[in-house]
Amino acid sequence: MSLARPARCLFCSFSRTATPGTRVPRRQFHSTPAPLTNRKPKFPNVRSSENQIESSRSGLKAEDFKSYTEEEKAHLAKEYSAAQMEAIKAGEAAIDPKDLSEQSVRRTDPYRFKYLDDFSVIEPGIDRNVRAPESNSDYNFKLKSEDQFVEDFGRFFAESNEDIKPSDFVRFAESLRLTEGKEENELNPHSALVPDLFGPGETIDEPRAEERKSAAEKGEKERSLEAEELTDALKSLLLATGYTERQVRELRTKTLVSHSVVNQTRLGKVRRAYRLSVAGNGNGLLGIGEGKSEEAADAKIQSQYRAIRNMQPVPRYENRTIFGDVTGKVGAVELQLMHRPPGFGLRTQHLIYEMCRAAGIHDLAAKVNRSRNKMNTVKAAYEALMSQRDPEEVARARGKKIVDVRKVYYAGKV
Amino acid sequence: MSLVNLAHVCSHLNNATKARLSLTSIPNSNLHLKLCHALQNSGYLSSVVRGGPTPPPAHPILGHPAANDEMEGIEPVTLDNVASRRLWLGLKYWRNESVLGKVKMVSKPTRRVTIDVEGLRRVVRGEDAGYVGGLRSPGESLFLSTDRGIMEARECVEKKLGGLVLCRVL
C-alpha cells in the first residue's frame, strides 16, 4: 500500500462484511491505476522451451567426444588423401571437446531438418551457378557439314557389328557431336545460363497427364462450340474484322451501361433496351459500342460486336500507363486521367477500371468531375485515352529532341 | 511588366490557333517580344517579326515573314513609329493540330507567382510546388521571367534560376 493513498475510514472495513455480493475493485482516488491482482494476459504466451523450438542440449559430456582411434584413422585413410587426413587431424585438435559438449545442440523440435544436406552437389534452383572454365570455350568452332555427318554415320556402321540394336542407335545419336572444334565447348560451355531445373520431360509429379487431360477437355469444348451455328451478326463481324471466331471469343468484352430508352411516338411509348460495352484485347486495343434492341440480350450482343468493330489502338507508355495527363469531356462529364508510376495499379472508378483492363493499362489514376453519368463517363474516358499526345510527334512538330530520361538513363528502373 | 496585356496575348494566341491562323499580331512590348522569342526557341512559333500595322511580306523561300529577311528588309524602330509597331507571329501546325496548344497564365495581374530553383526542380519532375502544378504531359512547358531574361523552366533549372512564373504551354 502506497503512502500517498488517502487514508480510508477505519470503520469501513467493519461495514464491508455487511454488504453481500462480490467485491468489485473500486476506483481509487489516485492518478496511478491500482494493479489488479487477478490480471492475466489476454493471450497466453508460449515459452520457446515449451514449444520445443529451442533444441534441448545434447546432454553429452566432454568425455563423450573422443578422438579417433587408430583403427578409425586407418579406415578414414582409405577414403581420404594424406592432405585431407592432415586437415581432419587439425580440425579435431582445433575444437575443444568441452566446447562441443556445452554448445552443441541437437534439435528435437518438429521443424528440424530431417535430412543431411549434400553440399557437394550444385542444385540449379538453390545454389549459385558455377560456370565452366573459360578455357572450355572455343571461338573457332564450326557446325558440321552434311558430308561430315554422313561420314560419322558411315563410321558408326563400319565399326558396329552385324546386329545393330535400337539402343546402339540411341547411343550413337547421343554421342554424336554437332560441331567441330573443342569438345568441351559443345558439352560444357562457359555459359552464363543456369541449367534447367528439370530436364526435358522431367516434372515434379507428372502434371503432364493433367495437361493432356485438360487439353482433351478443351478440344471437346471447342468442338461443341464449333457445332453451334454462327449467327449472321457474328459472321459479318468476322468478315469485317478479319478475326477468327476464336480470337473474337478471346477478346475482353464487358457491358458497362445498361438501361432502357423510350421513343415517344403518336402510338405511345416504345421501350427498348440500351447497352454500352467495351471491348479490348488486353494489349493496347480498345473500342466502345452501343446497342439498342427490344430484347436485352440482343442489345448486349449488338453493343459488344460494335465495340469489337470499333477497336482502336490506345497509346500506352511502357505498355502500362498513358502518355501524360489527359482530359475528356462529353456532356457534363469532365474527367482527367493521370499517368502513374509502375506498380501503382488502377485507382479509378469501376467504369474506367474496366476500360483500362480491356485496353491493358495497369497504372492509372482518374478523376471524374461535374456529372458522373455512366454512359458519358465511358465516352469521355475513351476520348481522353485517344487524345494522348505522342512524344515523338511533339518532338517532330516542335523541331526539338525529346528524350525519355527514364528509358535512356535509367533503363526503365526508376 | 503588365500581366494584363500578357493575359490578353495568351488568350489571343489560343483564339488564333483555334481559328487556324498562320500569322497573327500582338501588341509590341519588350515583355511580349522576349516571351515570343522564348516560345520560338522552344519551337512553338515559326517566326517573330516586329512590323507595322500591316503584316510584313513573307520570306520568298520560308513562306512566312522572317526577321533576317535580306530581300525585303525590316523597317527600323524609331521614335516616330514605335507606337504603331506590332509583333507578327508565325503559328505552326503539324498533322492537323496546332503546335502551340493551350497557353495559360500562371501568374495573374492580381497575384504574381514566383518560384525558386528547388520548387522548379519539383515542377520539372512533374510534382506540384506551391501554386505551380507539375509539368506532367509530354511537351508541356512553363515560361518564367528571370534575371537573365524569359526562359523555359528546364533551362532555368539548368542555370539554377528562379523567377516569376508567366505562363504554361501545353
Image (cartoon, coloured by chain):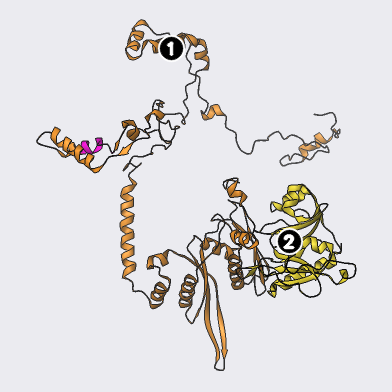
Shown colour of chain A: orange
Read off the magenta span.
A170-178
Q: Residues within 10 Å of mark 2 (few under 14, many from 20)?
A: many
| Residue A224 in sight here | yes
Quarter of the view holding residue B32 = bottom right
Picture disc at residue A87: 1
Q: Nearer the viewer, mark 1 or mark 2?
A: 2
Q: Residue at position x 86%, y 64% from top?
A: B2
Q: Position of residue A131 (x, y in %)?
A: 42, 31
Q: Nearer the viewer, residue B109 or A296?
A: B109
Corner quadrant of residue B46: bottom right
Q: Which residue in the rendered view is the most extreme toward the top?
A: A70
The residue tagged with tag 1: helix, strand or loop? helix
Q: Is residue A171 magenta?
A: yes
Q: Nearer the viewer, residue A46 or A332?
A: A332
Q: Which residue is mark 2?
A: B39
Chain that is yellow in the image = B
